[in-house]
RNA sequence: GCGGACGUGGUGGAACCGGUAGACACACAGGACUUAAAAUCCUGAGGCUUAACCGCCGUGAGGGUUCGAGUCCCUCCGUCCGCACCA
């Protein structure tokens, strides 16, 4: 029989059109079936999709298609995270408009996504730069403002003096702006903030409920929030030494038990006490300025020596009025953590110890490590910051660390300095409020107006949306909104006098903090259709890159709560993503020409293998250097264009390769050989199904009364494979599911060339199962095969076949037989054989007799259906 | 420095709860078909030893628990990731 090769690129277009015409991927918000919301992180429209997108969206699509086949009402939408700096930079460089550039990119990328054959519901598509989207975001902002969850404050920011904008921390590289290369300045600016810290505790505690999130992500978020339980302690200051108006110093500590080891106090250079003291001390003032200047570069921070300056101020120990402790200004104290002031206990803190050694301050051991003797214990180069027994600490001596912490806290809570307690228990967080102001055009305008008379006035709801002006100029750096001739000049909504619009726009992470809610009703008049949100949320499976472990995923968790607390979504659902999966990166070898320039994989030819493997630059015929395997990136040029792969091999091939071999959470290495292997498998399946279609029983034939052993065996394999593939797809172990499909394909191939009673019927069943198994992964090929098997329906619409549980367990099983824990043989025996029967059968085995060497069996361990171990 | 993850053939990886380690794929070798190549099909393969069977060794290293450890515990080595003067 002559078989034609399956022409993937041509047939894929056909099936994509069939699906589109049938409109089968549109979910109804009103459907009696159980719902399933599958979401992949939406892309930034940079211009073209890359292999990372292919991997991400393939995984989501497999799950979406599988869930649909399992009878769920599946929501699987797609949109565009379309605001952001690249569009504005493109506008500057190419003299176009951010909107035009963005929409052209969206069109191109949408075409690419469609060529992948994804089961997406395009009717719900939107871009965050659509007025229809950002007007609702402005409404949400106003509600947050009203609730006190959005506020303005002055804070230090990274300022790029060339581009004239605020930069995020990630955009500052070695103290310089990533685009301009200019030295970044610390600038005090009044900015808008979202009060994420109002939810610190809740965001931390709720992590434990996210049992379908990767442990790693939960841990990263927990560390980021950084809760610590401690004590605020107010120290009196010796009046003769302190600047006027400064009678006390409040510090924060998590180790109040080490209070009797205190040998110095340290405050941040920008602490009010430091500033006050600096006014009377020129050298100190200089020191403070020096510290602040160093604050900009991260690299400098890491290596900076611990430096201090004795202010001459003396603090009074809370437990001893006569005890004076010197107050230093130190470069390693951060103003925005705790109170910006500490007490130093050198024996119990490495950093304090280094400081004490440098300034020759006393080092008194106060915690005795377990197993040490007080008489002989000394502190050398390393502080002991663990738990132990208190020494040299008066009334704390002999206590454990924990008891001492409690004792000090209780005593200081009752002690008074002035009219207030000396000590207050306090939980501290590392988490900071989220600064959302950006001095940029291409973002969601912040809907407020500044009036000289009335101050900050929210834009009235009836005046929403605040649209971006289309006629902005991008000919020079800075914020086009700020220098637009008319846009910002508006009358004050309250007093009608001339006023100015806020010209900052929102951080684009705000846009992506609620798009998944909008997908549930993308055309609703209000930001959220509560009924739709109630029906669909939470997202049942969210899939994206690990790089969003903190930022996007933490912001979204916060924003969803803020939306709940401003009445936009149900209050008792707190977490928007029930399950999260973070997929690995797509990597590729790197290549360099003899001149040292990076080369695209398409620009080289590889010969030989192993040690002899060589790369040749095609253009010059000269050898090229093969470099490390790294994440695909423009800078290293180790890119493979999804378009090229799809045009040559087909989308199914790219999809299958992405799912094969590598566990989805790990990195996958893209190789030509791997793609070719996937391509071969596609042809193999096609040939096999053609073969089956020729020899199998007709479609819909009744199961024969009796099946021969070949047919029965094939049936068992088919049902087992179906069950195993289903379980592994549900667990997102796609690589294992793929392996099981390979294995079953081998079985089916072998069976197709045999003959036996009822085998034609079993072949049809097995063939259909195979097609349905590959349906979620290689949907086009599956449709083609389905048609070849005589159907005019769509696999994409077929329910997942039900595996017969009776076929999943074998009557006879093989169990291993060990002697003294070493495998010696195996035993084929009835699955429900009694223990005695198994023992007897094992002892009869020649191999066992030989291994026993005449010794009697002392003990026989039988684990039913698993193993026998004869102990001699 | 702190926190976490991982370490299995030539390669990617599989192994549910502690129960036959290496499924499946890639690469490789041999063979069939072919004038030849491609494509396809068949066969082989962890290491050592052996003509072969047998046997021994084997999941980064060392130790422990157990009838039995890739899996659990301890120590060490290596790789990767996150945070980093956080009081």
Image (tube, helix red, strand yellow):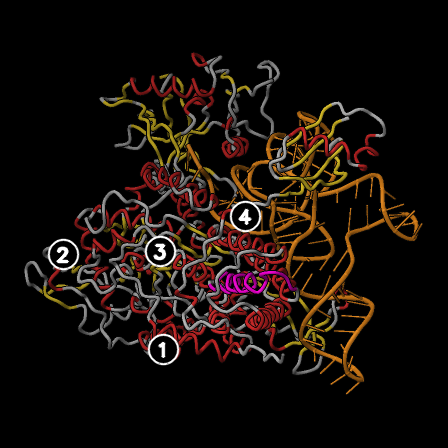
Q: Which residue is at the front of the view, A831 or A261?
A: A831
Q: Which residues are magenta?
A: A755-775
Task: Using the image, determine if residue A521 lies above or below residue A555.
Answer: below
Q: Nearer the viewer, mark 1 or mark 2?
A: 1
x and y, in percent, of residue A238 in the image: 33, 24
**Residue placed furthest toward the front:** A705
The crowding category of the residue bearing disc 2, from other C-alpha atoms within 10 Å (few below 14, some 14 to 19, many at least 20), is: some
The crowding category of the residue bearing disc 3, from other C-alpha atoms within 10 Å (few below 14, some 14 to 19, many at least 20), is: many
x and y, in percent, of residue A693 in the image: 54, 71
**Proximity of marks 1 and 2: CB atoms separated by less than 8 Å:** no
State which chain disc 3 sits on: A
State which chain disc 1 sits on: A
x and y, in percent, of residue A866 in the image: 64, 37
The crowding category of the residue bearing disc 1, from other C-alpha atoms within 10 Å (few below 14, some 14 to 19, many at least 20), is: some
Q: CA distance from mark 4 to mark 2?
A: 68 Å
**Proximity of marks 4 and 1: CB atoms separated by less than 8 Å:** no
Q: Which mark is residue A104?
A: 1
Q: CA distance from mark 1 to mark 3?
A: 35 Å
Q: Nearer the viewer, mark 4 or mark 2?
A: 4
x and y, in percent, of residue A523 in the image: 22, 65
Q: Which residue is mark 3?
A: A72
**Proximity of marks 1 and 3: CB atoms separated by less than 8 Å:** no
The answer as to whether the residues below labels 1 and 3 share one chain is: yes
């Amino acid at each position: 029989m002559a078989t034609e090769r399956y022409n993937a690129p041509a047939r894929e277009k056909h099936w994509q059109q069939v699906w589109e015409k049938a409109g089968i991927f549109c979910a109804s918000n009103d459907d009696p079936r159980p719902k399933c919301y599958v979401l992949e992180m939406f892309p930034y429209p940079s211009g073209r999709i890359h292999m990372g997108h292919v991997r991400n969206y393939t995984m989501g699509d497999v799950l979406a298609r599988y869930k649909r086949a399992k009878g769920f009402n599946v929501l699987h939408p797609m949109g565009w995270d379309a605001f952001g700096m690249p569009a504005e930079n493109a506008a500057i460089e190419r003299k176009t408009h951010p909107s035009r550039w963005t929409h052209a990119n969206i069109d191109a990328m949408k075409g690419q996504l469609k060529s992948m054959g994804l089961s997406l519901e395009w009717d719900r598509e939107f871009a965050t730069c659509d007025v229809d989207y950002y007007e609702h975001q402005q409404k949400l902002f106003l509600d947050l403002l009203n609730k006190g969850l959005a506020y303005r404050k002055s804070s230090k920011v990274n300022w790029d003096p060339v581009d004239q904008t605020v930069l995020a921390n990630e955009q500052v590289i070695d103290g310089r702006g990533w685009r301009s290369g200019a030295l970044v300045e610390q600038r005090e600016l009044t900015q808008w903030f979202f009060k994420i810290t109002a939810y610190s505790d809740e965001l931390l505690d709720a992590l434990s409920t996210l049992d379908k999130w990767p442990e790693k992500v939960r841990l990263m978020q927990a560390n980021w929030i950084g809760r610590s339980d401690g004590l605020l302690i107010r120290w009196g200051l010796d009046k003769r030494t302190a600047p006027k108006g400064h009678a006390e110093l409040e510090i924060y500590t998590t180790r109040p038990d080490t209070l009797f080891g205190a040998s110095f106090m340290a405050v941040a250079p920008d602490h009010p006490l430091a500033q006050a003291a600096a006014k009377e001390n020129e050298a100190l003032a200089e020191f403070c300025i020096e510290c602040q200047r160093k604050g900009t570069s991260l690299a400098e921070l890491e290596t900076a020596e611990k430096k201090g300056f004795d202010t001459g101020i003396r603090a009074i120990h809370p437990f001893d009025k006569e005890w004076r402790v010197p107050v230093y200004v130190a470069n390693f104290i951060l103003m925005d953590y705790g109170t910006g002031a500490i007490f130093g206990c050198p024996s119990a803190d490495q950093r304090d110890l280094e400081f004490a050694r440098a300034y020759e301050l006393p080092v008194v051991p106060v915690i005795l490590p377990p197993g040490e003797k007080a008489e002989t214990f000394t502190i050398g180069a390393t502080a002991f910051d663990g738990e132990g027994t208190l020494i040299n600490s008066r009334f704390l001596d002999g206590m454990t660390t924990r008891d001492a912490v409690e004792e000090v806290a209780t005593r200081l809570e009752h002690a008074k300095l002035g009219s207030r307690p000396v000590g207050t228990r306090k939980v501290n967080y590392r988490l900071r409020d989220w600064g959302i102001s950006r001095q940029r055009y291409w973002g969601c305008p912040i809907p407020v107006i500044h009036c000289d008379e009335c101050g900050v006035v929210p834009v009235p709801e009836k005046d929403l949306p605040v649209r971006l002006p289309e006629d902005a100029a991008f000919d020079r750096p800075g914020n086009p909104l700020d220098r637009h001739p008319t846009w910002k000049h508006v009358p004050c909504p309250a007093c009608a006098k001339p006023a100015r619009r806020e010209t900052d726009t929102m951080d684009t992470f705000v846009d992506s903090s609620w798009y998944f809610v909008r997908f549930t009703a993308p055309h609703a008049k209000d930001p959220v259709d509560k009924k739709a949100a109630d029906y669909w949320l939470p997202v049942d499976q969210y899939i994206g890159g690990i790089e969003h472990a903190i930022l996007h995923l933490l912001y979204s968790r916060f924003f969803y709560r803020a939306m709940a607390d401003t009445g936009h979504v149900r209050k008792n659902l707190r977490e928007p993503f029930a399950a999260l999966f973070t997929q690995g990166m797509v990597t590729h070898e790197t290549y360099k020409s003899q001149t040292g320039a990076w080369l695209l994989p398409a620009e080289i030819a590889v010969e030989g293998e192993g040690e002899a493997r060589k790369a040749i630059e095609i253009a010059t015929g000269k050898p090229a250097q093969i470099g490390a395997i790294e994440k695909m990136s423009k800078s290293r040029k180790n890119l493979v264009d999804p378009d090229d792969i799809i045009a040559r091999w087909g989308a199914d091939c790219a999809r299958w390769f992405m799912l094969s071999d590598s566990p989805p959470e790990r990195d996958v290495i893209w190789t030509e050989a791997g793609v070719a292997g996937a391509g071969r498998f596609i042809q193999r399946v096609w040939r096999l199904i053609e073969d089956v279609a020729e020899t199998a029983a007709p479609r819909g034939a009744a199961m024969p009364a009796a099946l021969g052993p070949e047919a029965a065996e094939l049936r068992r394999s088919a049902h087992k494979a179906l069950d195993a593939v289903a379980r592994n797809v549900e667990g997102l172990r796609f690589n294992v599911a793929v392996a099981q499909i390979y294995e079953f394909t081998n079985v089916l191939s072998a069976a197709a060339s045999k003959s036996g009673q009822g085998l034609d019927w079993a072949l049809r069943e097995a063939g259909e199962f195979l097609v349905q198994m590959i349906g979620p992964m290689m949907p086009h090929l599956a449709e083609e095969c389905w048609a070849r098997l005589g159907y005019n329906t769509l696999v994409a619409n077929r329910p997942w076949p039900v595996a017969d549980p009776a076929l999943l367990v074998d009557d006879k099983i093989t169990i291993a037989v060990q002697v003294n824990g070493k495998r010696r043989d195996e035993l084929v025996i009835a699955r429900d054989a009694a223990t005695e029967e198994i023992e007897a059968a094992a002892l009869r085995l020649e191999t066992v007799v030989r291994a026993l060497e005449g010794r009697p069996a002392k003990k026989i361990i039988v684990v039913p259906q698993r193993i026998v171990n004869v102990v001699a």
